[in-house]
């Protein structure tokens, strides 16, 4: 049976194998992920997602995957949902119930157009980190 130290070393070796170093003329840094490929989620989101119905969870995950990282923050948190894009995941009735549920739990914030939503930044986003001019 492997010891705790063996398990720790195994996990540590895996983590070290995933580090990517980026060196530019101006700076260098190391990361575990490729730049601009990840979205950020809050600590509360997994618990919130566990409470969602299956159709709502499917719609939410597809909406998250359709978000695009963009230097324009407005575009980076905006998702347009149309029944046609979700037909393979949920039926018509469940589609509308899921939209309502996502708004009720404040994962989707409605806009002036009924099929355009803001993904709640506090729970998930693909925003660039804002730069401060000091």
Image (cartoon, rainbow, N blue to C red):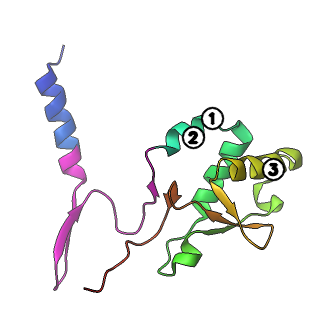
Q: Are marks 2 and 1 in contact (CB under 8 Å)?
A: yes
Q: Are marks 3 and 1 in contact (CB under 8 Å)?
A: no
Mark number for residue 48? 2
Q: Look at the image and tell me whether residue 95 can be seen.
A: yes
| Tag of residue 114 | none
Q: Label 2's element?
A: helix
Would you name the residue on which mark 3 appears?
95
Residue found 17% across the figure and 85% down from its top: 26
How crowded pointer 2 is (Cα within 10 Å; few <14, some 14-19, many 20+) is rated as: few
Percent of width and height locating residue 61: 61, 51
**Residue at x 85% of width, y 46% of height:** 91
Q: Is residue 8 above or below residue 78?
A: above
**Of the residues under marks 3 and 1, which one precedes in the sequence?**
1
Check the picture and name the quadrant holding the N terminus: top left
Q: Is residue 127 above or below residue 120?
A: below
How far apart are the alpha carbons under marks 2 and 1? 5 Å
- Comparing 39 with 129, the one in front is 129
Crowd rating for badge 1 (residues with CA inside 10 Å; few <14, some 14–19, many 20+): few
Q: Which residue is situated farthest in the top direction here?
A: 1
Return the residue at label 1. 51
Of pointers 3 and 2, the one earlier in the residue sequence: 2
- Residue 94 or residue 11, whichever sits in front: 94
Q: Residue 86 in magenta?
A: no
Read off the magenta span. Answer: 15-43
Q: Label 3, label 1: how many angstroms apart (C-alpha)?
A: 17 Å
What is the residue that sits farthest to the front in this orientation?
Answer: 134
């Amino acid at each position: 049976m492997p010891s705790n130290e063996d398990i720790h070393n195994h996990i540590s070796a895996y983590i070290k194998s995933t580090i990517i170093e980026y060196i530019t003329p101006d700076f260098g840094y190391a990361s575990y992920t490729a730049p601009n490929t990840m979205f950020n989620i809050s600590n509360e989101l997994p618990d919130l997602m566990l409470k969602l119905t299956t159709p709502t969870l499917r719609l939410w995950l597809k909406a998250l995957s359709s978000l695009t990282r963009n230097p324009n923050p407005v575009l980076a948190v905006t998702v347009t949902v149309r029944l046609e894009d979700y037909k393979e995941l949920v039926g018509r009735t469940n589609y509308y119930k899921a939209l309502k549920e996502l708004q009720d739990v404040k994962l989707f914030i409605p806009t002036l157009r009924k099929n355009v939503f803001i993904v709640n930044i506090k729970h998930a986003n693909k925003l660039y980190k804002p730069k401060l001019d000091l």
